[in-house]
């Protein structure tokens, strides 16, 4: 019997496992890096053990330190969560060698599935449908497009799509280098890239007595950089025959490796409805809550039960009910190449409505750092039908109060309401086709709604300055006030649109805008306006120069602008600034001051939150300054280099006259 469990992970998944442990009466142990000393998972655990350092390689990826922490804290079992060491056979073996219970599959199963190339050979022997591999050395134009994938690991690292044969050697080299850096293994393989394919997976649960459950399907097709964004269960639009074929293939895959515990078998389903085995994840998936909602199960509780040697509760799983959809809320800017964002997370509140579940590793007041994945939370909706679940989730995200770094919240809401998603027309190219439209400003009514939110921000600030904090101000007519008009300027984030708001303050202290809105109430934290006969409520929260305005129809973030520009904010033309906090991992070959560069040439590579980002030359010219070096940690806006434009060639006759 497990009495004390150490979770060899952090953030949201650690908090989620602790929740089940509390319900089962199991004591909990957290491990944490120096960067996570004040993190939510540390605060929620009964005991916590420090792993000195901040980088994953020094902390959460150090299996020896994690095992030592479990022994020091008196734990008798270890749960790996997902990511980090969750699919590391050596770590699983070390846990068992230390006399601890491993809450995961057998070591042999992890080893067999650790390499995607070996896993495919095993699945072929079990008659699981596969894509035929392609030898990159003999690939021809008829093999295109190709998908290059790292043989070990996941999360989109080491993955490339090749559409031109001439690009294949360079992409192979890049994919191998990225895979080696991420997983310590540079093996890469190639297979046909299926256009408009769907990512469909089957959750399995197996015990040590030979019972294997296939717990329905999930669709995880909406992805960015080969990482999932929105997932749902069951996968929509599959006929009964295809669904049975996927279930049977998943069970066969589990039986082929003697699987035990929770796992996921992933498939690519072509536009014609043909399934192909991708890989088997020998761990709990990020998106497991949608399966839990539909089947009414606690998969972590079942993992613990199986790890203790117990059987699954029945020979067959319970009947599914309803539909569930999950959205991953990231601190990132989708409109700027998905750049991860950092900083203080001032507020994180999602409406606690029936059917809504929030899994998170953050609360308001925490800080989003540079070392780990930028996922803030998962928001899950469960309802009787897909239409109801999608609508419920979109509305919950729209009403959430999230103050701090830029997030993908607006993208999630728009994605859930996109006609293709609503109709279930899903494939992995969704964001390739729709991202520009989904992140574009200027939707009908958007500018007017933001201006009204900026008006509320100005009136709340004015009410505070007038001492209106004691209660709501009374309505006052603005047209005949004797006071001189005042203005406040705001820049909408993240697109930079500026709004100038004019208002007057009445004799009773009530601020009133000069654009016709009727002020029903105004105080520092809340404003109620009537416009066009419609009453709208605004909650206004100010943090330094940032103003957050939340409404029932959406949220807005503004920066209050000073009246005059600070000359210190100006930078030298051609300056290359760090787009996010991170670590410089490499420079372009031969990059030194005086080197000639071409417009668009990658010059500097930054790594932040497990992603690699390129800094490009803004124009052709000469590198006149270089402040970046491999290993250097930089903050957002740090000056990395300066490129001076190449001067235009002088006409020949001018050259002669100046000799």
Image (cartoon, rainbow, N blue to C red):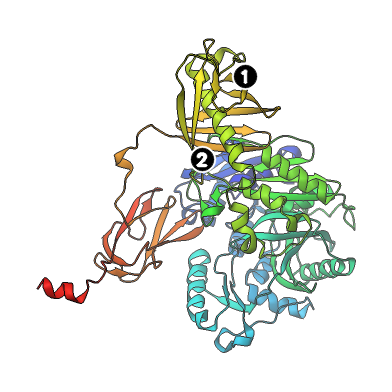
Horizontal relation, residue 571 to residue 290: left or right: left
Expressed as whole percent of the image width and height from the top left, the position of residue 314 reads: 89, 54
Q: Which residue is mark 1?
A: 521
Looking at the rendered structure, the secondary structure element under dot 2 is: strand
Question: Gap between marks 2 and 1, in whole Å?
Answer: 24 Å
99 in relation to 131, above or below: above
Q: Which mark is residue 492?
A: 2
Q: In this rendering, does residue 162 appear at all?
A: yes
Looking at the rendered structure, the secondary structure element under dot 1 is: strand
| Residue sitting farthest toward the left | 659
The residue at 58%/41% (across/down) is 447
Q: In this rendering, does residue 524 appear at all?
A: no
Expressed as whole percent of the image width and height from the top left, the position of residue 341 reads: 50, 47
560 in relation to 110, above or below: above
> For residue 129, what is the image quadrant?
bottom right
* Quadrant where the C terminus is found in the figure: bottom left
Mark 2 and mark 1 lie on one chain; the one further toward the N terminus is 2
Expressed as whole percent of the image width and height from the top left, the position of residue 30 reads: 58, 43
């Amino acid at each position: 019997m497990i009495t004390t469990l150490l979770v060899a992970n952090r953030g949201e998944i650690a908090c989620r496992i602790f929740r089940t442990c509390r319900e089962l009466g199991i004591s909990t142990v957290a491990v944490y890096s120096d960067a996570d000393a004040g993190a939510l998972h540390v605060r929620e655990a009964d005991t916590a053990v420090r792993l000195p350092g901040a980088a994953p390689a020094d902390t959460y990826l150090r299996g020896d330190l994690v095992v030592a922490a479990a022994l020091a804290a008196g734990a008798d079992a270890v749960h790996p969560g997902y990511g980090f060491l969750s699919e590391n056979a050596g770590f699983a073996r070390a846990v068992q060698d230390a006399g601890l219970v491993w809450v995961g599959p057998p070591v042999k199963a992890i080893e067999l599935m650790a390499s995607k190339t070996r896993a495919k050979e095993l699945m072929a022997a079990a008659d699981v449908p596969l894509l035929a591999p392609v030898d990159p050395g003999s690939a021809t134009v008829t093999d295109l497009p190709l998908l290059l994938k790292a043989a070990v690991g996941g999360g989109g690292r080491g993955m490339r799509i090749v559409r031109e044969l001439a690009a294949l050697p360079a992409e192979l080299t890049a994919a191998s280098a990225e895979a080696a850096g991420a997983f310590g293994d540079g093996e890469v393989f190639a297979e046909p890239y299926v256009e408009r394919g769907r990512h469909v997976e089957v959750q399995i649960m197996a015990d040590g007595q030979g019972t294997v459950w296939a717990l329905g399907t999930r669709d995880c097709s909406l992805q960015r950089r080969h990482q999932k964004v929105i997932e749902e269960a069951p996968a929509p639009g599959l006929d009964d025959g295809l669904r049975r074929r996927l279930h049977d293939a998943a069970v066969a895959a589990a039986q082929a490796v003697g699987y035990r515990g929770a796992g996921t078998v992933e498939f690519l389903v072509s536009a014609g409805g043909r399934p192909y085995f991708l890989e088997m994840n020998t761990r709990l998936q990020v998106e497991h809550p949608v399966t839990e909602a539909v089947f009414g199960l606690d998969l972590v509780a079942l993992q613990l039960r199986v790890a203790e040697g117990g059987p699954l509760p029945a020979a067959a799983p319970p009947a599914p009910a309803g539909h569930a959809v999950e959205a991953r809320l990231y601190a990132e800017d989708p409109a700027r190449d998905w750049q991860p964002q950092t900083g203080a997370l001032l507020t994180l509140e999602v409406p606690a409505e029936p059917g809504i579940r929030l899994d998170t590793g953050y609360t308001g007041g925490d800080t989003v750092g540079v070392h780990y994945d930028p996922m803030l939370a998962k928001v899950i909706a469960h309802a009787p039908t897909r239409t109801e679940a999608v609508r419920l989730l979109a509305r919950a995200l729209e009403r959430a109060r999230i103050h701090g770094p830029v997030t993908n919240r607006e993208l999630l809401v728009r994605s859930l309401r996109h006609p293709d998603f609503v109709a279930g027309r899903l494939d992995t190219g969704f964001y390739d086709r729709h991202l520009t439209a989904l992140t574009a400003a200027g939707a009908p009514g958007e500018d007017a709604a933001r201006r009204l939110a900026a008006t509320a921000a100005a009136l709340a600030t004015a009410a505070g300055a007038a001492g209106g904090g004691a209660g709501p101000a009374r309505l006052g007519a603005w047209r005949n006030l004797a006071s001189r008009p005042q203005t406040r300027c705001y820049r909408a984030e993240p697109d930079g649109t500026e709004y100038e708001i004019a208002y007057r303050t009445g004799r009773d202290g009530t601020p009133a805008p000069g654009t016709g809105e009727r002020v029903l109430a105004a105080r520092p934290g809340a404003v109620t306006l009537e416009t066009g006969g419609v009453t709208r409520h605004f909650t206004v929260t100010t943090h330094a120069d940032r103003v957050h305005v939340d409404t029932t129809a959406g949220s807005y973030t503004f920066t209050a602008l000073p009246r005059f520009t600070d000359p210190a904010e100006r930078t030298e033309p051609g300056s290359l600034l760090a787009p996010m906090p991170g670590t410089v991992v490499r420079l372009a070959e031969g990059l030194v001051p005086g080197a000639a560069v071409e417009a668009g040439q990658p010059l500097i590579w930054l790594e932040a939150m497990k992603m690699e980002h390129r800094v490009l030359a803004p124009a052709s010219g000469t590198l006149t300054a270089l402040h970046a070096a491999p290993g250097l940690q930089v903050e957002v806006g740090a000056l990395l280099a300066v490129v001076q434009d190449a001067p235009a060639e002088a006409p020949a006759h001018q050259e002669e006259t100046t000799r």
